[in-house]
Amino acid sequence: NYILAIETSCDETAAAIVKNGRELAANVVASQIESHKRFGGVVPEIASRHHIEQITITLEETLSQAGMVIDDIDAIAVTEGPGLVGALLVGVNTAKALAFAKNKPLVGVHHIAGHIYANRLEKEFEFPLLSLVVSGGHTELILMKEHGSFEVIGETRDDAAGEAYDKVARTLKLPYPGGPHIDKLAQEGDETIDFPRAWLEEGSYDFSFSGLKSAVINKLHNAKQKGDTLEDKNVAASFQASVVDVLSTKTYQAAKEHQVKQVIVAGGVAANQGLRKALADKFEGEEIELLIPPLKLCTDNAAMIAAAGAVAYQQGHRAGWDLNANPSLSLERYASRSIKHR
Ligand code: ATP
Ligand code: FE
Ligand code: MG
């Protein structure tokens, strides 16, 4: 079957077509980064307007890339949450209008389920699996025992990893989004500063990055007052070492405890070179298979929504015409939704 998916949860207007849940037929992402850059972050109102302007052309481009027409599509999947409400609404309403006009089944998808399922475009899942989700708004360890089941065994108590990256980058006056810039600097620098690592209570798989973020900001502030020079690349390398150490160690411990077959990394921060390397080192020689998606599937896209939507469709999930954007939709609530037919 062919699933057409739409993703508009944040600042990329995206559409994609996936065949049989795993084969990419088309993948189009219209990024708005340039419009948000000068504000140092995503401006929700601007994001919604861009989505409205871009959605039709993005869909047309997607169909033409696949060499298909809308009648060839079996079902329409759309990100229903979490995300910016005004941004989500554009995707949800477009999907509903298309499904209604063309009499196609409609499937709602959780954005983070999408980030996880991006990996299935590369490799079939084997359960139980553990997913480390590290994105702009989420840092979670999720245990999956079967398709469509998501158990959050650890999550951030304050900032998400990507958010910490972006805030530290802003302090270093790097452009938005700062994650990739810090990553690049970190590779040139050395870990000369011993920043804290928030391990939290023994056995906890939760995360905390706000203390680290403050430590970096204080360090820079103090150095400036004393007239010391701190090299940005060393600050970046030291910050990244702390983030990567905690993420990779907790992921490894959780994978061992739950005896998983695969560990999959998802979300924009999965693009981080330091994290990729640390995880590869940790799992080297282990029976656990480590999956990290290619860079273009790490950040927001609709192919991942189609991949997750294909499974939900297969399992019989159908959204009704009352499908609505849910900016704070939780994974657990999404996983336990009832199968609805219309
Ligand atoms: P969410 O998925 O939680 O709703 P989001 O969609 O905004 O949030 P993504 O698009 O998945 O998040 O990821 C964007 C984040 O990834 C940004 O915070 C960005 O700085 C970060 N990021 C991207 N590349 C890298 C990198 N190489 N190193 C570190 N962080 C990175
Ligand atoms: Fe995302
Ligand atoms: Mg994004």
Image: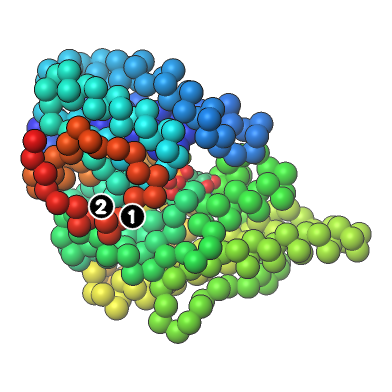
Residue type, numbered disc 2: Tyr
Q: Quadrant of the C terminus?
A: top left
SS label for mark 1? loop
Q: Circle 1 is placed at which residue position?
A: 330
Q: Residue at x 55, y 52 (%)?
A: 163
Please say if the residues under marks 2 and 1 sit with CB atoms less than 8 Å apart. Answer: yes
Instruction: Give the left or right position of residue 104, taking residue 135 as reference.
Output: left
In the image, 101 versus 2, the foreground residue is 101
Which residue is depicted at the point 73% across and 59% down? 217
Q: Residue at x 50, y 30 (%)?
A: 47
141 above or below 22?
A: below
Q: Residues within 10 Å of mark 2 (few under 14, many from 20)?
A: some
Q: Position of residue 34 (x, y in %)?
A: 58, 27
Q: Which one is in front, 272 or 36?
A: 36
Residue at the image position 43 percent from the left and 33 percent from the top: 87
Q: Which residue is mark 2?
A: 334
Q: Using the image, determine if residue 240 lies above or below residue 77.
A: below
Residue 342, visible in the rendered structure:
yes
Foreground pick, 325 / 258: 325
Classify the position of the N terminus by image quarter.
top left
